[in-house]
């Protein structure tokens, strides 16, 4: 009886090892594919980000402002910037104050 | 029958067999089951080891990402600002060449190319097709045109992949990023000092600078450079607690995309490479040094101060002859008294004062992220050198070192290392205390008075809600062993003074008076047309105020923590 149990357990171990190895390989292949796709998407993202950085640069934005928005975009002063704070369900609008004076 | 009778004798068979142990080297002592178990165990072990190996090895992608990019000699890692905007980027581009010997039908090829590139001069191309073996039809082709041209399927069309280094912000970060040469070697700025790292790694380098803040500072600086007709100008914004530089602008600058060979000395980095006698901004250090030694208090009186003194035939006088003869130490700094500062310096003594200036990095060689840093001259502090150094003459230093000094003076007295590289993971806690406890607060309080009181010299920088404190410095430029009329006007400011976060320095090199510029008073109603004096108070302070007006909301909402 002991021998049968021993042989059986060895057989199960070998079988499980084979299954695990096989599935690990499959997962690795999937990871490889995902990473390859990610690499491609990353390079696409970098290209688009570069374009965005160029078009969204301060210089370009000011150019667009003068072309399309004219006087609509105005510089905010610190006294016009408010802080919206939620504390224990209480909503408060406070002045943005960085000084103690 | 009897005849064939024979005897059968049964004898005991003597068996000569003796059991002997097998004397081979292979000594298998266990039974069959154990042996089978052993064999299976070995197989199992082999599989387990293989499985562990499979599990522990790195994926192919990781290997690709981490190995040095040796396949592409022109590759360099990208450089980004603190918000992840590209400041320098390596991109691939394709040039289209034509191998004329492989052209089968010239007319057909020209016709097809005319459709793709309608604006090209095809007479020239036809000439090249007849005369040359190989020529470039289009450099840096767009993706759209690349697809179209490759669809022609003409084997004479040769696409050549090339790597380009582009700087999307153009001039904005030229003095920080620097340039590369055609062999992909950095020749200035971070491109030079981080050359090896940029070539070996794929991971981008993230800087501490903010693109938007840098843009606003540069824009204002250019505007005022034209107003005051200065030869050059510079500005630097740094966090006083961790040394992170948010902006570093030096004018004139250049476009690194053009790869110019710059030889004009006016294009030097005025923050790191240019050394200047910065004048009265040094009086803050004299005041701080005496406080640190416990020799004075802000209220300590200095009586009967003369209007001028002599040192080795050189006359030291006051800039403003209406300055009172009896002043407290605090008033000496507020009213920027030269003789008073000399008296404070004399109280400290040459060795102690020199040692203090070295400790705060003003007269010490600075180790910075970019290599273009001026060597710091070692001065012998005699009687006269001590006197002139007390009010910022006779000793030259860089704006970068000045910023470091002001950062230490305002951050509670802790050492700080100016940096351009974002090291978020590193511990930025204050460590090495340089000034005694309480000194920093005393100095900052006086710096605030320079901006917000009537007798202060920096009233034009009193921007509401930012609590700006600072010291002006108007220095004559040395020329042929003497001093010329040309000025270096500097304003070193810190803000907000109740909890200093930033040091901001503006320097104008050789500014002129602006007759038509209208100054709007910040401390009272009205204004003044035309620059009254060619001093820092009427030039660099005005510029600093206007810049803080612009960058203040960004700093307040993005970088300053509010409670």
Image: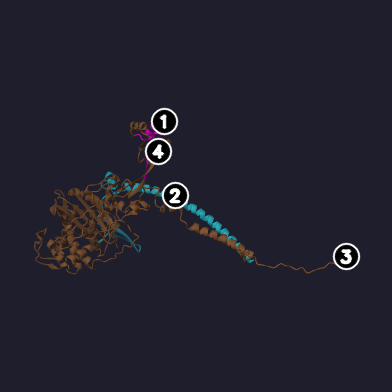
Chain colours: A cyan, B brown
3D distance between C-alphas at marks 2 and 3:
104 Å
Going from N to C along the chain, the mark reached first, 3 or 1, is 3
Query: Label 4: how many residues lie within 10 Å, few (<14), some (14-19) or many (20+)?
Result: some
User: Which residue was labeled with disc 1?
Assistant: B105
Quick one: SS at disc 1? loop
Asked where in the image residue B341 lies, by quadrant, the reply is: bottom left
3D distance between C-alphas at marks 4 and 2:
28 Å
3D distance between C-alphas at marks 3 and 1:
122 Å
Asked where in the image residue A15 lies, by quadrant, the reply is: bottom right
Magenta segment range? B92-118
Q: Which mark is residue B158?
A: 4
Quick one: SS at disc 3? loop
User: Which residue was labeled with disc 3?
Assistant: B5
Judge by depth and name the residue closer to the eye, B88 or B355: B355
* Both labels 4 and 2 in a single chain: no
Quick one: SS at disc 2? helix
| In this picture, residue B380 sits left or right of residue B61 | left
Q: Report in which chain the residue with disc 4 lies.
A: B
- Does B483 appear above or below B353? above
Of tags 2 and 3, which is closer to the observer? Answer: 3
Whether tag 4 and tag 3 are in contact, CB under 8 A, the answer is: no
Of tags 3 and 1, which is closer to the observer? Answer: 3
B4 part of magenta stretch: no
Query: Label 1: how many residues lie within 10 Å, few (<14), some (14-19) or many (20+)?
Result: few
* Both labels 3 and 1 in a single chain: yes
* Both labels 2 and 1 in a single chain: no
B104 part of magenta stretch: yes
Q: Is residue B458 visible?
A: no
Q: Percent from the top left, x then y, of residue B49? A: 52, 59
Q: Report in which chain the residue with disc 1 lies.
A: B
Q: Percent from the top left, x then y, of residue B499? A: 25, 63
Judge by depth and name the residue closer to the eye, A54 or B371: B371
């Amino acid at each position: 009886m002991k021998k049968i149990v021993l042989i059986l357990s060895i057989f199960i171990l070998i079988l499980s090892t084979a299954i695990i190895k096989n599935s690990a390989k499959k997962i690795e292949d999937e990871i490889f594919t995902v990473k390859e796709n990610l690499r491609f998407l990353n390079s696409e993202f970098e290209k688009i980000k570069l374009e965005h950085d160029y078009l969204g640069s301060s210089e370009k934005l000011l150019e667009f402002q003068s072309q399309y928005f004219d006087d609509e975009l105005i510089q905010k002063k610190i006294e016009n910037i408010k802080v919206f704070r939620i504390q224990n369900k209480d909503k408060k609008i406070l002045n943005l104050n960085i000084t103690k004076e | 029958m009897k005849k064939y009778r024979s005897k059968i004798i049964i004898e005991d068979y003597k068996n000569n067999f003796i059991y002997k142990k097998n004397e081979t080297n292979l000594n298998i002592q266990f039974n069959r089951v154990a042996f089978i178990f052993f064999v299976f165990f070995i197989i199992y072990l082999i599989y387990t080891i293989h499985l562990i190996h499979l599990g522990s090895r790195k994926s192919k992608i990781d290997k690709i990402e981490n190995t040095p990019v040796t396949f592409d000699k022109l590759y360099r890692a990208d450089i980004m600002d603190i918000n992840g905007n590209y400041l320098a980027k390596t991109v691939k581009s394709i040039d289209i060449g034509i191998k004329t010997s492989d052209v089968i039908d010239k007319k057909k090829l020209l016709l097809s190319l005319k459709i793709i590139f309608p604006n090209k001069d095809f007479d020239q191309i036809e000439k090249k097709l007849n005369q040359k073996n190989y020529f470039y039809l289009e450099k840096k082709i767009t993706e759209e045109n690349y697809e179209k041209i490759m669809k022609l399927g003409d084997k004479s069309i040769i696409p050549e992949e090339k790597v380009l280094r582009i700087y999307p912000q153009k001039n904005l970060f030229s003095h920080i990023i620097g340039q590369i040469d055609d062999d992909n070697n950095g020749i200035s700025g971070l491109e030079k000092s981080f050359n090896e790292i940029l070539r070996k790694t794929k991971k981008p380098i993230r800087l501490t600078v903010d693109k938007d803040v840098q843009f606003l500072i540069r824009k204002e600086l250019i505007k005022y450079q034209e107003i005051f007709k200065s030869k050059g100008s510079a500005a630097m914004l740094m966090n006083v607690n961790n040394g992170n530089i948010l902006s570093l602008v030096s004018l004139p600058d250049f476009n690194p995309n053009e790869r110019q060979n710059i030889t004009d000395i006016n294009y030097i980095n005025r923050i790191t490479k240019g050394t200047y006698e910065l004048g009265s901004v040094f009086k803050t250090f004299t005041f701080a040094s005496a406080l640190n030694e416990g020799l004075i208090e802000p209220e300590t009186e200095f009586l009967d101060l003369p209007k001028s003194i002599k040192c080795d035939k050189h006359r030291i006088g006051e800039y403003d002859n209406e300055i009172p003869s009896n002043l407290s130490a605090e008033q000496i700094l507020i009213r920027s008294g030269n003789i008073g500062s000399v008296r404070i310096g004399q109280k400290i003594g040459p060795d102690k004062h020199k040692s203090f200036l070295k400790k705060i990095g003003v007269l010490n060689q600075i180790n910075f992220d970019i290599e273009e840093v001026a060597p710091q001259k070692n001065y012998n502090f005699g009687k006269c050198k001590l006197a002139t150094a007390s009010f910022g003459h006779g000793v030259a230093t860089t704006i970068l070192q000045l910023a470091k000094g002001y950062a230490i003076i305002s951050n509670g007295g802790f050492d700080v290392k100016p940096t351009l590289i974002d090291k978020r993971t590193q511990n930025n806690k204050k460590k090495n205390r340089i000034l005694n406890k309480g000194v920093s607060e005393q100095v900052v309080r006086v710096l605030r008075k320079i901006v917000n009181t009537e007798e202060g010299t920096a009233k034009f920088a009193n921007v509401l809600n930012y609590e700006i404190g600072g010291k002006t410095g108007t220095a004559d430029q040395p020329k042929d062993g003497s001093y010329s009329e040309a000025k270096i006007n500097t304003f070193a400011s810190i803000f907000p003074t109740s909890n200093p976060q930033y040091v901001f320095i503006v320097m104008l090199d050789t500014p002129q008076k602006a007759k038509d510029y209208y100054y709007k008073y910040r401390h009272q109603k009205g204004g003044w047309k035309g620059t009254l004096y060619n001093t820092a108070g009427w030039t660099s302070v005005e510029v600093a105020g206007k810049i803080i007006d612009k960058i203040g909301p960004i700093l307040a909402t993005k970088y300053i923590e509010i409670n």
